[in-house]
Amino acid sequence: MSRASTAAAIVVAFTGAACTAIVVGSIGEKSDWPERDGASSSSTTSSSGSSSSSGGEEEDNECSLLLVRKGSPLDKDNRCARCINEYCDDHVELACNREGQAKPWFQTLKNCARNPWDGYPEPDSGGSFSWGCGRYEKVEPLVEGDQQSDNARQRASEHCVHDNCLQGAEPECRLCEVSKTKGTTSERQRLRDDKCGSCFTENCNAVLVECCDLPIMDDYIAACAYTNEKANKRKCGEIGDAGLVDAGDWKPLGSRYGAEDQACAKKLGECFNTHCAAKKECQDE
């Protein structure tokens, strides 16, 4: 399934680590935001009542980013939802406005928390999707003046997600779960679950995240997610050639790859040569 053809938003699951320290100051300390009746804040439990541990369900918490109504099999816990709920909890509660009508930007927060995958749908999702956190990748300056206005509060929430959950080499809200269909079936297998392809996720995940939305991922790295097929294993191994030449000199697909693609091809090729090429499971028979 090509990423270029994916459009509808779905949600999928993946657990992971917590994220970086909260940014305060001009955005406002947590105590600066109005408390709601019955609301409380902590680093592990959101004011909307959602525990940051996985495995449970919440049937009636309309403000939860982590867990959703019982009976929905796709809205599950993931590291991005944890990050937003931990560091931007007050923004979530304010946007949800549980005593009244939710703010329009509450849906934007939910879309990000439940769709942090930039590139591929989860194998068990049964559909396609789009990355929900792009809105927070680049944010406008904080609003000056009335900090209690909806515009100011929305912009503050955007900065909170950007500063806490979209930084570093492996941001909590930009995940790359490369997968490949198994033969002629509709079943998909993750890169991390392939005996050969797992060498990428174990050693070069930051490069996967950096390059996740580029064609080279579909053209070569996705093949590494199901190397039980000889053709896929052969295609996977070809990326190693890109690591042996200067970026820009590897042109197996002609002029299709631009400078960004070539730079990623170089990094991915070097990763393969260093961590994958010697593995028996990656060698073409």
Image (cartoon, rainbow, N blue to C red):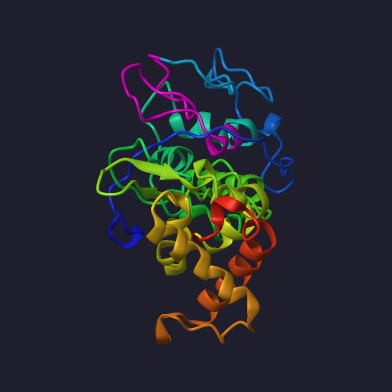
Q: Residues in magenta?
A: 59-83
> 143 or 19, which lies in front?
19
Image quadrant in which you'd find residue 230: bottom left
> 58 or 71, which lies in front?
71
x%, y% of residue 238?
50, 70
For the point 58% across and 61% down, which residue is it? 210
For the point 39% across and 29% down, which residue is it? 75
Q: 22 left or right of 255?
A: right
In the depicted structure, whether residue 263 falls above or below residue 109:
below
In the depicted structure, whether residue 215 falls above or below residue 35:
below
| Residue at the limit of the structure toward the front, as seen here | 285
Q: Is residue 76 magenta?
A: yes
For the point 52% across and 53% down, which residue is it? 136
Q: 283 left or right of 119?
A: right
Name the quadrant of the N terminus: bottom left
x%, y% of residue 29?
71, 36
Image quadrant in which you'd find residue 164: top right
Camera sees residue 166: no
> 213 or 163, which lies in front?
213
Q: 96 left or right of 181?
A: right
How many labels sit on residues? 0
x%, y% of residue 18?
67, 35
